[in-house]
Image: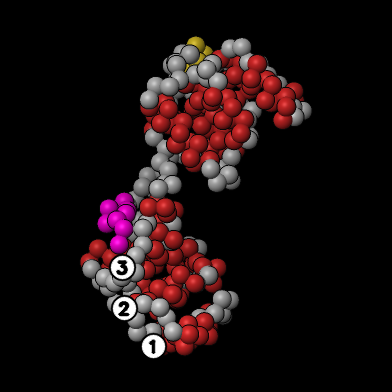
Amino acid sequence: MNLTSEQQNFINTHFYEGIPREELNESKLKQLKTSEELHYLATHHNWDDGVKVLQWIAESPVCSEATALELFWLSQPQDFQYYKLDQTLKDASQNEVFILLKTLLENYPNNFYQKTEIQFDPAPLYEDEFIIPDWIFQKTNGEEAYIYYEKDDVDVWFDREWEKNIREAESAIELFNIANFIDEPEYAAQILQRRLCDKGTAVLIFWRLYTECSAYTYTNTMLQGIINNIVNNKYPEVLSYNPQTDEKVKYKKKKIAWEVPDIFRKTV
């Protein structure tokens, strides 16, 4: 069902981008009588304006399953899995999102929302979920690795020198030393492609990417690729590297307080 221009104008007038919170009126939302109207509002809402409107939508029995499912994944549930569901977060805006998530967690599995022709596939929003396995934080087997490159020397390398040194490295320990200083994914990828790259170096690169390159959108894909390659025994065990004693590794394993129910991963 396509919305009429009148329906769209009503929504755009009363729920426009940047509207002050005090001007939001739940009675106006209750005038929206169809799932399609709520879906239009939800998908055009700017999350920077807060989630008050989205909370009203999540509490509405007129809301479709597709809309609720999309709201759930856009709320980035993975960021809240470390908090107990009965917990109140100190940050007010974060707590509002958490309340929205808890509403959806309660209502969605209980068939609260409408089954409609609106469709939504959540896979693109959750397939990038990334879980660090315990074993990649453990010491690798092999000869004890050591660093003989100096940071001051590496700091003056330009792109060509990085590429040349990676390409011309003659041993696993030389490649390991280069990997110790990477802060760019492209250099990590070049090292991982070398036949001399061993498991210790691959694990080192994993943690350099995790710590130094988290801002890159494709870092998680690279991290998952390293995990997959290690699981498939792509890298020989040559050098011993212990991420737990590496001062550059900033990682503290967090315990997940709740799991995302499987029903939230199914297309509607």
Q: Is residue 261 magenta?
A: yes
Query: Looking at this rendering, what residue extends furthest in the right direction?
Result: 156
Q: Is residue 22 left or right of residue 135?
A: right
Q: Can the viewer see residue 61 in this picture?
A: yes
**Image location of residue 17, percent across then percent down:** 56, 76
Amino acid type at circle 1 is: Gln
Residue at mark 2 to residue at mark 1: CA–CA distance: 11 Å
Q: Is residue 77 above or below residue 4?
A: above
**Residue 200 drawn at (x, y percent):** 49, 21
Which dot marks residue 65?
A: 3
Left or right placement of residue 38 versus residue 112 in this view? right
Mark 1 residue element: loop
Residue that numbered label 2 is attached to: 62
Q: SS class of the residue under badge 3?
A: helix
Q: Is residue 262 above or below residue 248?
A: below
Q: Which residues are magenta?
A: 259-268
Q: Quadrant location of residue 205?
A: top right
Which disc number belongs to residue 31? 1
Q: Earlier in the sequence, mark 1 or mark 3?
A: 1
* Nearer to the camera, 266 or 30: 266
198 to 63, vertically: above or below: above
Q: Is residue 96 above or below residue 138?
A: below
Classify 10 Å Cα crowding around label 3: few (below 14), some (14-19), many (20 and above): many
